[in-house]
């Protein structure tokens, strides 16, 4: 059970790619859901609230590349904008 009140990307987007998620077997577990290096950033689990820094996430049905390749798209993403609005002065584009 999630102990924080802030949604991780897989919860916000309802993609089902978290471990045990509805689409994890079909599409694979998203790297942001299992990358523990960023655990706790913006109050998220693993990279769940800083998914834009993780290579290989699946967004809009397409595997995304490195931070440099995907950040332009991420900055337009409704989840990225949601985290930005929640974190305001504490927002971190990367760790």
Image (cartoon, helix red, strand yellow):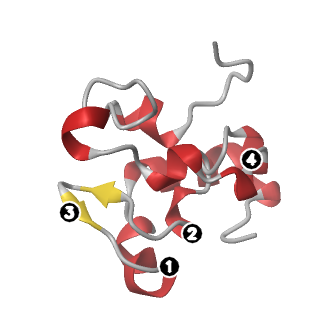
The location of residue 8, given as percent across then percent down, is 55, 37
Give percent across and percent down for residue 73.
35, 72
Of residue 66 and residue 26, the one placed in the foreground of this image is 26
Distance between the alpha carbons at the discs numbered 4 and 2: 13 Å
Q: Determine the secondary structure under disc 3.
A: strand
Residue 65 appears left or right of 41: left
Q: Is residue 11 left or right of residue 40?
A: left
Residue toward you, 29 or 62: 29
The spot of residue 10 in percent (x, y) is: 43, 37
Counting other residues with Cα less than 10 Å from the Cα at mark 2, is it few (<14), some (14-19), or many (20 or more)?
A: many
Q: CA distance from mark 2 to mark 1?
A: 5 Å
Q: Which residue is disc 2 drawn over? A: 53
Q: Residue at x 76, y 69 (%)?
A: 95
Residue linked to disc 4:
39
Which of marks 3 and 2 precedes in the sequence? Answer: 2
Whole-percent x, y for residue 75 in the image: 45, 68
- Classify 10 Å Cα crowding around label 1: few (below 14), some (14-19), many (20 and above): some
Q: Which mark is residue 62?
A: 3
First in sequence: mark 2 or mark 1?
2
- The reply to whether the C-beta atoms of the residues labelled 4 and 1 are less than 8 Å apart is no
Task: Name the residue at the front extreme.
Answer: 25
- The residue beneath circle 1 is 67
Question: Mark 1 to mark 3: distance in Å?
Answer: 15 Å
Q: Quadrant of residue 14?
A: top left
| Callout 2–callout 1 Cβ contact below 8 Å | yes
Q: From the viewer's perspective, is residue 61 above or below residue 5?
A: below
In terms of secondary structure, where does tag 4 sit?
Answer: loop
Q: Separation of disc 3 and disc 4 at Cα?
A: 24 Å
Exactly how many numbered labels are in the figure? 4
């Amino acid at each position: 059970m999630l102990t924080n009140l802030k949604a991780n990307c897989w919860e916000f987007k309802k993609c089902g790619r978290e471990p045990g998620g509805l689409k994890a077997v079909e599409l694979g577990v998203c790297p942001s859901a299992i990358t523990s290096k960023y655990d706790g950033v913006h109050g998220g689990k693993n990279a769940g609230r800083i998914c834009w820094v993780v290579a290989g996430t699946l967004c809009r049905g397409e595997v995304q590349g490195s931070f440099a390749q995907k950040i332009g798209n991420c900055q337009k993403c409704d989840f990225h904008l949601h985290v930005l609005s929640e974190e305001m002065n504490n927002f971190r584009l990367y760790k």
